[in-house]
Amino acid sequence: MSGATASQEITPTYNPKNRLTQINKNGAVSGTYVYDGDGVRVKETAGGVTTVYIGAYFEWTGSTATMKS
């Protein structure tokens, strides 16, 4: 995988619809991804931070809501 050094092992996991659901780095989970029934990503957890996607225009992380332009 691009960006990996010789000492890193990065393993992606995909669901049956070929959408990324998890990334493991050196055997530890570094990111998880959740999709709705239409295949739209609705939640991402990476680096200890969870982001919830609300439609195509809003994101919610912790106590902060962001409107995408």
Image (cartoon, rainbow, N blue to C red):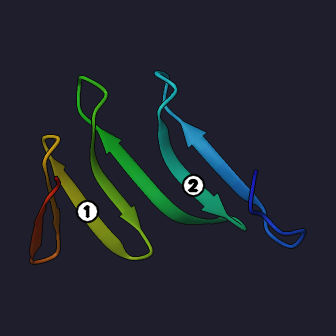
Mark 2–mark 1 Cα distance, whole angstroms, equals: 16 Å
State the image coordinates of residue 32 (x, y, percent, origin top left).
43, 55
Q: Is residue 48 above or below residue 43?
A: below
Question: Callout 2: few (<14), some (14-19), or many (20+) C-alpha neighbours within 10 Å?
Answer: some
* Mark 2 or 1: the one toward you: 1
Q: How many marks?
A: 2
Residue situated furthest right in the rendering: 6
Residue at image point 46% right, 21% down: 17
User: 69 or 15: nearer the eye?
Assistant: 69
Q: Position of residue 22 (x, y in %)?
A: 51, 50
Q: Nearer the viewer, residue 66 or 63?
A: 66
The disc at residue 51 is 1
Look at label 1 and name its amino acid.
Thr
x then y, percent, for residue 49: 33, 73
Label at residue 23: 2
The relative height of residue 11 versus residue 16 in the rendered view (above or below) is below
